[in-house]
Image (cartoon, grey):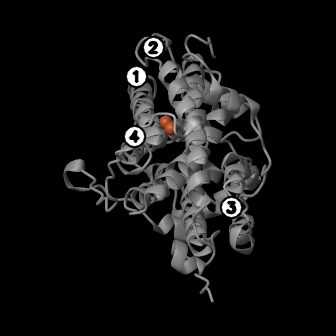
Amino acid sequence: MEIERTNLELVGREDVHDLAAVLGTVGHEEPGGRHLVEDPCPAEFTWDYEKGARPRLDRLYEKAKAAQWNARTDLDWETAVDQERLVVLSQMAGPGSLRWSPQDVAGTVLERWGDEEWLRLGMENQNWMLSQFLHGEQGALLCTAKIVETVPWIDAKYYAATQVMDEARHVEVFSRYLDEKLSGHYPINAHLGLLLDDIIGDRRWDMTYLGMQIMVEGLALAAFGFIHSMTQEPLLKQLLRYVMADEARHVAFGVLSLQEHYAQLTDAELRERQEFAFEAAVRMKDRMLMQEVWERLEVPAEDVVTVMSRAPGRDEFQVLLFSKIVPNLKKLGLLDAAGGWLREKFAEMGAIGFEDLADAAQEADAEADGSPAARNLA
Ligand SMILES: [Fe+2]
Ligand SMILES: [Fe+2]
C-alpha cells in the first residue's frame, strides 16, 4: 500500500497558496559568485552507433541542424529601445498591466504610489523577468549538456548536442538584451534556483528531461508567447520569435524521449515522476510572485501578500502559463496515472486548463526546415 506524501513533505508547506511561506524562502549570494551543484547521475557511453534507430529523434536532429541561426548577425541589435516609453504604453493597455486600481492596493504602501513608482515597478519587472529568462536558459544549457552525457540512445545524444548550441545562443541573446537595452540585472529567483538544483542534482537521467524539457521549457514557451504577443518592441519580438522556434523543438524532444522511457516504468516509478512534476510546478508558481522586485522596491512582505492575492487576472495568467505543460503531461500519461493524482494536485494549485491544446504553430516550428532568419519570422 502506497503511503501518501503530504504537501509539507513534497514542497515544504501544507497550503500551496500560502504566499507568506513563499516569500519566506529567499535566495542567497554565494562567496565569489560561484554556484556548484553535485551531479550524481552517471555518464553513459553507448556502443550502438546506429543512426536513425529512433527515426523521429533522428528527424528532429536533422531539422535542428538546418534551423541554426546566429544571434549576432540575424537580429538587428542597432534597434533603439526606450524602456520607459514601453512601460508607460503597456500600463495604459489596461487589464493585465502592472498598474493596479486603488481598490486593489488599498491598505498597502502601494496606495501612496504615483506615476513614478508605478513606472519603476514596470521597469524593474521587465529587468527581473528577462534576468530570470537568462538564468533559466543557463539552466537549460547545463541540463542539455548533462543529457548528452546521460541519455543511453545515440539519436538522443546527437539531438541534445544541437540543443546545447541552441541554449548557448539563448543565453547570449538574453544577456546582451539585458546589458544593452534594459536598466539592470537581478540574481536568480530563489524558487527557480531550487528547481534547477533539484533537476541537476537528480541521479535518474529521465528527470532532467521531465524537469527541463517538459516543465521549465514548457512554461518558458508559454511566457515567451505571451510577451511576444504583447510587446511593441521589435527587437524583443523578433528575438523571442526565434527563441520560440527553437524551444518548440526542445519540448518535442522531451515528449518523444519520455514517451518511450515511461512505457516501461512501473506504477511506483511513474508516481515518483508525478511527484517530481508537482514539486517543479509549485516552484514555478512560486517564482511568479517576483519577490526580488518587491524587495528592491522595499514593499513589506505583508503588503506583497495582500496585493498579489488581489492582483487582477493572476489566476487566469497562471493557467495560461501552464497551458503548454498540462497537454504534454497528459500525453505522457502522467496527469492520469495513479488514479489521477497529478490532475488533482494541479487542480488544487489552480493550474489545470488547455489539456487537449494542440498548438499548430508550435508543431510547425518543431518540424520546420531552415533557420528562423531564412524563414523570415517576426
Ligand atoms: Fe532556451
Ligand atoms: Fe530550450
Percent x, y of residue 96 = 73, 41
Cβ(mark 4) to ligand 1 < 8 Å?
yes
Question: Distance from label 4 to label 1 (Cα)?
Answer: 22 Å
* First-in-chain label (4 vs 1): 4
Residue depth check, mark 3 versus mark 1: number of the one nearer the observer: 1
Residue of label 1: 180
Q: Which one is in front in this view, the residue at disc 2 or the one at disc 1?
A: 2
Q: Which residue is mark 3?
A: 309
Query: Mark 3: which amino acid?
Result: Ser
Q: Is residue 259 left or right of residue 62?
A: right
Residue at the spot 47% in from the left edge and 68% down from the top edge: 24
Report crowding for label 4: few under 14, some 14 to 19, many 20 or more residues within 10 A (C-alpha): many
Badge 3 marks a residue whose secondary structure is helix
Which numbered tag is attached to residue 244?
A: none
Identify the residue under disc 2: 77
Q: Judging from the image, what secondary structure is the residue with disc 2 in? A: loop
How crowded pointer 2 is (Cα within 10 Å; few <14, some 14-19, many 20+) is rated as some
